[in-house]
Image (spheres, helix red, strand yellow):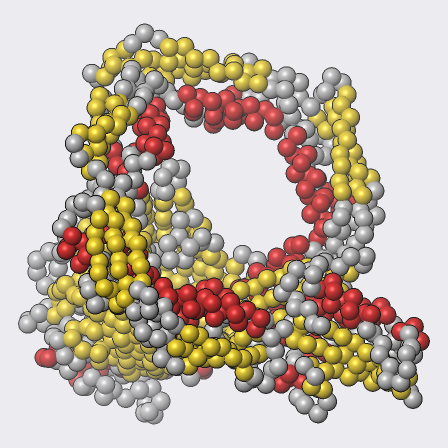
């Protein structure tokens, strides 16, 4: 009788193995023993799955080819019981079969081995038949939460019972569920569960009453709970509304409110009577008496946040108040509480007694001889004038003691002396001065005279010794002894010695001034990996999974390799669950490794919307540049398909549309160029292949189409890119080729003021090669609090590559993030530097260009005569621009620049040099809100050689961040530290408001 493998190992797997071994030979003619066939040549190996021979059928339809490799009884080899038992171990360990049997039949050529495999049948799909009466997604969510994605077919009765209970909770007392299993897939272990749903009539509310005396009329309570006669009964929804109502009462100060329900169905189950019990309890008020408290009392006594006034919370609040005052130097602070009832109100009173304040007067250290005062001083985190806090004194004493013990002074002790002086008064405040004296008793220093390791055969003794911190001449530090032991254990377990034991022996001498360390290693047996078993994969190829594994057949059974294999598989993004584990096997030095995966959906779709708020550069009726407040709604759509052709290849389509106004320019979408239109969009199609060309690098090919509005022009760009990125330890190197075509239109700069290159190339074709080196150690890409980003990019465009314009361009950036001591303070700093130089290009004479309409200039190569003018500018699409919410926040988008980079009307033309520096401090304020102060400096320069630090524009400002589920919502208000006169008259705007998503840098 088959034994289901989902039972315990002792009751399932062991029985299956024994049954298979006992039934190893079944003769068709007469009885024989298994030993009779041992040693004979195997003439044929037959495999049956659920009674279906695999002969003549595609193995892929029934069972993947990797499973066949687990069968070690192979044609042409002698039959051995070792191979039989090993095969059974592999198949049972895989967890895909509830019964494994093997038979031997005589043959003229030797023996025929026949394997009979009975798969564990699992439910791969659930079909709901009939009228569900409740939303189908709710049913599937209930079953998925309780039974998982692919439950065993043996759990059908549980599924039916759970679904009937689900319906009963929602008022369907007579619901009947009929289940049947069908084979609708080619794989015999995959079943389809068809659930015939007959919910029956839903119970309606006959009567609803409220007992006790609520704070509101009974009719209002019933309305809030939606308990009206004739309405369908849904216990699940009712309890959710009761919880909301209870929370509402607690939010109004009734912290002991309770709402309960009792219901009773009629005999036929078609109606129900509901009785609601509302116990609002007394209104609770928290008051403070005695000395005043600094800061927010709600943080110290969080009854409103916790919605309760139980005894434990009040006791914790009393201790929290006293501790907060002690941190301010009130050494004897107390805050007992009293709870009394006055009518329908409970008043909780905290009586605060601060007592005298104590402040540190002097801090001295004595008794040190072996260590210099300069080594101890950094640990004295107390200075004159600080509040005296006893816990901090103890921490300082412990830190000094630990420093001595690290240096080998195992008997060192630090005794803090505290002397309270008579009261003093300074600046109108009375306090008690405290003199602190840390008396050090050093004791003898213990040095290691030598460390030996005995019993080592699997490792090189010298290699082991080099990893130990306690070596000859080093101070003896007992915690380091445990760390060295762990180092030895890790080294051996990495090589598969799982039963290794390590002991240490210490031999002290010279009054404990010298110690010799002797390590004794008992290695035990090395455990090797036998087979790597893979289960749970559907579309992902076995070869891809094996490629990501660091543990292989024949390698040592290493815990590190198991964890790294699991991490690398999870990092592919192809699986929603990954587990790599060792399968136990007694009496053997080999183990199987089971890789159990659950694939993530191959196709993902995401979409969303938002808005961008800020000031942009517009154009007034006189053609002058001005700044306008702009609100731009936007939406995006993303479609991704992973695991193409069983590999970790993926394709992605991304589209974004932003509704923007036309900046007052005729010809753009929107009424008279000022209404909203679809004039800002981007579409991107990407194909990505990890480990491309048989390497560890990733390749990516993209095609894009985008249109956007800038301050001085609008543009339309389309092109293709090809990337190859390779990750090294700590950094990533990327190479890229880009071919794109960019068209400028709706230029706000008059033709006579445009750069010659923009007159010549309003539409420009660029062919570029690009390389970058990036090091990114941020702890969070969206909201970093620790780490850094360092990167250098370089790009070259040349006519020999098919580009109409040639140039070289470099951009370097560095960002650093540090979490400061305290309650979540973060300091962030950044620097960006960009330089570009155009290659010389012959163009017509300036007067000829000026006399011609825009875009009608002949280009080099179209006339026989050589052009007399040489330019070295970059196209507008490649020049640097700055100003806005991610660069210098005191300026609107693109409005930053030296006078040489602005046209006479004030529109930015961009430049070949960029310098931007940022400094930002983020401080927690309340829950998910941060307050921010920032200073930005930067400028745009016409030529790279024009870069000057004294021409940087300085801005500063404040803002806040709200940590939303989709990332930080950012509001920044930047101010120019000095405003300049505009070429068009008047002064620059002094401040700019930015609203966006994500950190500025």
Closest to the observer: 908 or 79?
Answer: 79
View extreme (top): residue: 422
Q: Does residue 127 appear in this view?
A: yes
10 sits left or right of 866 in the view: right
The answer to which quarter of the image holds residue 251 is top left
Count of labels in the image: 0
865 sits left or right of 161 in the view: left
Closest to the observer: 344 or 437?
Answer: 344
Question: Residue at image x 74%, y 62%?
Answer: 14
Q: Is residue 577 above or below residue 453?
A: below
Q: Is residue 374 above or below residue 500?
A: above
Closest to the observer: 217 or 329?
Answer: 217
Q: Residue 515, how many percent across, how many down?
A: 75, 26
265 sits left or right of 901 in the view: right
Question: Residue at image x 78%, y 57%?
Answer: 586
Question: Residue at image x 31%, y 74%?
Answer: 201
Q: Residue 616, how many percent across, how many down?
A: 18, 65
Q: Quick one: quadrant of the C terminus?
A: bottom left
Closest to the observer: 838 or 204?
Answer: 204
């Amino acid at each position: 009788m088959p034994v289901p493998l989902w039972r315990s190992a002792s009751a399932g797997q062991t029985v299956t193995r024994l049954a298979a071994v006992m039934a190893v030979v079944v003769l068709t003619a007469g009885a024989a023993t298994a030993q009779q066939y041992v040693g004979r040549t195997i003439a044929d190996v037959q495999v049956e799955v659920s009674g279906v021979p695999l002969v003549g059928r595609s193995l892929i339809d029934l069972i993947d080819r990797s499973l066949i490799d687990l069968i070690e009884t192979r044609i042409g080899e002698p039959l051995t019981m070792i191979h039989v038992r090993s095969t059974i171990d592999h198949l049972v360990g895989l967890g895909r079969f509830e019964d494994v049997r093997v038979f031997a039949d005589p043959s003229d050529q030797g023996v025929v081995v026949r394997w009979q495999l009975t798969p564990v049948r699992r439910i791969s799909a659930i079909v709901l038949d009939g009228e569900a009466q409740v939303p189908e997604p709710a049913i599937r969510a209930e079953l998925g939460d309780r039974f998982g994605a692919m439950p065993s077919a043996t759990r059908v009765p549980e599924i039916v019972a759970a679904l009937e209970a689900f319906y009963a909770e929602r008022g369907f007392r007579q619901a009947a569920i009929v289940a049947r299993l069908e084979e609708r897939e080619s794989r015999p272990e995959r079943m389809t569960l068809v659930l015939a749903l007959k919910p029956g009539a839903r119970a309606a509310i006959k009567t609803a009453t409220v007992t006790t005396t609520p704070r509101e009329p009974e009719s209002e309570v019933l309305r809030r709970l939606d308990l009206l006669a004739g309405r369908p009964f849904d216990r699940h929804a009712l309890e959710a509304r009761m919880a909301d109502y209870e929370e509402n009462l607690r939010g109004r100060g009734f912290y002991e409110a309770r709402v309960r329900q009792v219901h009773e169905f009629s005999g036929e189950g078609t109606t129900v009577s509901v009785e609601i019990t509302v116990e609002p309890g007394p209104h609770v008020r928290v008051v403070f008496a005695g000395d005043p408290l600094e800061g927010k009392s709600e943080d110290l006594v969080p009854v409103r946040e916790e919605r309760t006034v139980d005894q434990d919370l009040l006791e914790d609040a009393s201790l929290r108040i006293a501790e907060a005052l002690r941190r301010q130097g009130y050494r004897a602070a107390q805050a007992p509480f009293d709870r009394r009832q006055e009518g329908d109100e409970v008043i909780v009173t905290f009586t605060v007694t601060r007592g005298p304040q104590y402040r540190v007067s002097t801090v001295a250290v004595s008794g040190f001889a072996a260590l210099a005062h300069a080594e101890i001083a950094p640990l004295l985190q107390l200075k004159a004038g600080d509040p005296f806090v006893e816990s901090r004194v103890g921490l300082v004493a412990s830190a000094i003691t630990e420093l001595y013990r690290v240096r080998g002074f195992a008997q060192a002790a630090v005794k803090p002396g505290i002397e309270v002086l008579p009261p003093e008064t300074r600046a109108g405040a009375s306090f008690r001065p405290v003199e602190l004296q840390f008396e050090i008793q050093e004791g003898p220093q213990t040095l290691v005279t030598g460390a030996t390791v005995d019993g080592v055969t699997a490792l090189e003794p010298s290699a082991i010794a080099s990893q130990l911190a306690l070596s000859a001449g080093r101070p003896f530090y007992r915690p380091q002894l445990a760390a060295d032991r762990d180092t030895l254990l890790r080294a051996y377990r990495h090589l598969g010695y799982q039963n290794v034991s390590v002991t240490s022996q210490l031999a002290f001498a010279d009054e404990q001034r010298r110690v010799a360390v002797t390590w004794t290693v008992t290695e035990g047996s090395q455990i090797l990996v036998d087979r790597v078993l893979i289960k749970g994969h559907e579309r992902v190829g076995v070869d891809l999974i094996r490629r990501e594994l660091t543990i292989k057949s024949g390698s040592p059974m290493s815990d590190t390799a198991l964890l790294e294999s699991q991490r690398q598989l999870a990092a592919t993004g192809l699986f929603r669950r990954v587990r790599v584990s060792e399968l136990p096997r007694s009496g053997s030095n080999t183990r199987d490794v089971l890789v159990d995966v659950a694939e993530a959906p191959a196709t993902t779709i995401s979409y969303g919307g938002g808005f961008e708020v800020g000031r942009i550069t517009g154009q007034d009726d006189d053609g002058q540049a001005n700044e306008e407040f702009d609100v731009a709604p936007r939406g995006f759509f993303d479609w991704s398909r992973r695991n193409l052709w069983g590999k970790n290849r993926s394709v992605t389509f991304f589209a974004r549309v932003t509704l923007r106004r036309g900046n007052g320019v005729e010809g753009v979408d929107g009424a008279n160029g000022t209404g909203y239109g679809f004039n800002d969009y981007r579409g991107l199609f990407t194909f990505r292949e990890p480990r491309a060309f048989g390497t560890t690098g990733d390749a990516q090919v993209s095609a894009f189409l985008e249109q956007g509005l800038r301050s001085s022009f609008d543009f339309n760009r389309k092109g293709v890119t090809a990337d190859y990125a390779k990750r090294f330890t700590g950094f990533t190197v990327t190479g890229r080729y880009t071919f794109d075509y960019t068209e400028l239109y709706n230029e706000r700069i008059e033709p006579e003021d445009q750069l010659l290159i923009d007159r010549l190339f309003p539409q420009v074709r660029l062919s570029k090669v690009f390389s970058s080196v990036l090091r990114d150690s941020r702890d969070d890409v969206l909201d970093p609090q620790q780490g850094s980003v360092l990167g250098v990019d370089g790009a070259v465009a040349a006519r020999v590559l098919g580009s109409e314009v040639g140039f070289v361009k470099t951009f370097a950036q560095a960002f650093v993030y540090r979490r400061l001591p305290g309650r979540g303070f973060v300091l962030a700093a950044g620097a960006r530097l960009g330089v570009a130089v155009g290659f010389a290009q012959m163009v017509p004479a300036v007067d000829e260009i000026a006399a011609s309409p825009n875009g009608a200039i002949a280009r080099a190569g179209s006339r026989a005569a050589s052009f007399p003018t040489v330019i070295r500018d970059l196209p507008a699409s490649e020049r640097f621009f700055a100003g806005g919410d991610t660069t210098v926040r005191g300026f609107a988008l693109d409005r930053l620049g030296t006078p040489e980079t602005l046209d006479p009307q004030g529109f930015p033309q961009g430049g070949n040099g960029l310098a931007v520096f940022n400094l930002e401090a983020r401080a927690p304020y309340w829950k998910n809100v941060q307050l921010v102060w920032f200073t930005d400096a930067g400028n745009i320069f016409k030529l790279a050689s024009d870069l000057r630090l004294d021409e940087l524009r300085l801005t500063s400002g404040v803002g806040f961040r709200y940590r939303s589920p989709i990332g930080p919502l950012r509001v920044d208000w930047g101010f120019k530290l000095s405003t300049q006169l505009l070429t068009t008259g008047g002064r620059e705007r002094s401040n700019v408001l930015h609203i966006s998503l994500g950190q500025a840098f």
